[in-house]
Image (cartoon, helix red, strand yellow):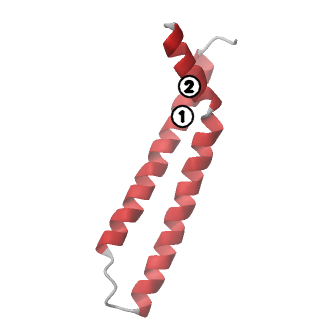
Amino acid sequence: MTEIEERFARRAVRRKRLFFWMSTAALIVAAFLIVLYSTWFFIGHKFDVGPRAVIILLVLLNARQQLRQYKYATILEQLLPPS
């Protein structure tokens, strides 16, 4: 592993908790949006759900990516030699 790659890996390991909390925050935001848009839909039936569903899907995909980065950082932490 080159020095640049090792620095990249160590930086990812340092940000491991950040990835986890960003994933959790995205799930909370998605849940809030689902509740909010559902309420708006049941109050006014002319409310268009399609574009809002896309926004929720994008937030959930972001949460999934952050969780994937957390898992990669966990694996890198185990593979890197102690500094």
Above/below status of 33 relative to 13: below
Please give the name of the residue rendered at 57% of the width and 62% of the height, measured from the top-left corner: 28
Instruction: Identify the secondary structure beneath mark 1.
Output: helix
Q: Which amino acid does label 2 sit on?
A: Ile
- Disc number for residue 82: none
For label 2, the residue is: 75
Number of marks in picture: 2
Q: Position of residue 14 (x, y in %)?
A: 64, 29
55 to the left or right of 9: left
How far is mark 1 from mark 2, CA to CA?
Answer: 6 Å
Callouts 1 and 2 close, C-beta under 8 Å: yes
Q: Disc 1 designates what residue?
A: 71
Q: Tag 2's secondary structure? A: helix
Locate residue 80 relative to residue 39 in the image: left or right: right
Residue 76 lies, in percent from the top left, at: 56, 22
Q: Which residue is found at the position 31% from the left and 80% from the top?
A: 48
